[in-house]
Image (cartoon, rainbow, N blue to C red):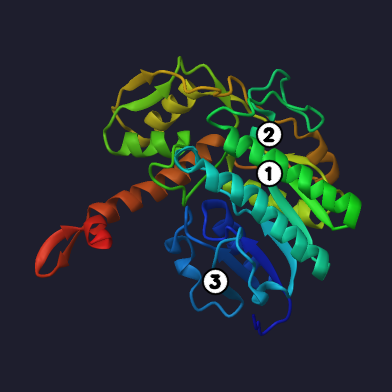
Amino acid sequence: MDFPFGPFVLVPGGAGFLGSHLCDRLLERGHCVLAFDDFSTGTRSNLQHLQGHARFRLLVGDVSDVLPAAITAARRVFNLACPASPAYYRRDPMRTVLSGVIGTWRLLELCQRTGARLLQASTGEVYGDPQQHPQTEDYFGNVNPIGPRSCYDEGKRCAEALTFAYHRERRVDIRIARIFNTYGPRLRHGDGRVVSNFIVQALSGEPLTVFGDGLQTRSFCFVDDTVEGLLRLLEADIEGPLNIGNPEEHTVLDLAERVLRLTGSHSRVVHRPLPADDPHRRRPDITRAQRKLGWEPRVSLDDGLRETIRWFRHELQLAARPVMLNGHAARAGEAASS
């Protein structure tokens, strides 16, 4: 694909939540960027603001298929092309495994031919329901290989193994980031992630759904901080894996209370049964990232939630706004789906 300023950065999954923010930051730093996405979980609206940008291109396609010749000029590759939403990967587990493993294989083959560097976006889910706390990169994890989450967890573990196999056997230049819970603007409604679920429920006046007793913990990293960690890792002299996440640990109930306070919502909290294999504790040890990258999160949970709430409030207002459709008033969401 022709760019006016030379070689480009390839971002499979570039229309997703994290990928679109990464595209923004790469462009801010002066790179040419090619987003490659099949829109199975990403959306065009995430990239709408980049239409017409001289150093940005969008190519529609599935990373699990034969890759188009247009991407061979890439010199850096961020592989974010795998569903990260629980609601999606539980609905389509086969596609989740294939995109995570076959897609990674195709990109590794590309990088072997072209000499490009690949950053493989792995996940804190490779640790499963951890018995070590906090989780260091040396911990092997506690994963159910056939459970309802295994399509994502084991797909990512296999992708890590494949990435290092190409590095050791074929000298492919690689980096691996284990990304923990990330949140921020452009999360999708109804994607099964706890932050977006709570915010949409609170703004809509619906009960906040907490699974189990709510005492299970998560560590929430604002998207700007995660993107900065990925950019630093790509250019660092270390293959990884490196944990990229926020080491502050919060219970799910604490998150619910924060969302209610920051939205001013009077919604109540309701409890539902805990899903199978749901991790009880999740907290990254980021000592290695601090030492090797000089990186750590900067955005507090409250500040990040405020920005995310502002974005969702705007999105919900747009969805509720009446528009004219065939001479009749309809909701914006109805018009888009008709």
Instruction: Mark 1: give few (<14), some (14-19) or many (20+) Cα within 10 Å.
Output: many
Amino acid residing under circle 3: Leu
Q: Which residue is under mark 3?
A: 58
Quadrant position of residue 14: bottom right
Q: Residue at x 85, y 44 (%)?
A: 292
Upstream in sequence: badge 3 or badge 1:
3
Upstream in sequence: badge 2 or badge 3:
3
Q: Which residue is under mark 1?
A: 122
The quarter of the image holding the C terminus is: bottom left
Taking 209 as reference, is 146 left or right? right
- Marks 2 and 3 close (CB-CB < 8 Å): no
Q: Position of residue 172 (x, y in %)?
A: 85, 58
Amino acid residing under circle 2: Val
Q: Is residue 237 above or below residue 65?
A: above
Do we see residue 224 in this rendering?
Answer: no
- Marks 2 and 1 close (CB-CB < 8 Å): yes
Quadrant position of residue 192: top left
Q: Position of residue 9 (x, y in %)?
A: 69, 68
Inter-mark Cα distance, 2 to 3? 30 Å
Q: Residue at x 76, y 53 (%)?
A: 232
Q: Position of residue 249 (x, y in %)?
A: 61, 25
The quarter of the image holding the N terminus is: bottom right
Q: Residue 126 has which mark? A: 2
Q: Residue at x 41, y 23 (%)?
A: 210
Q: Residue 37 has which mark? A: none
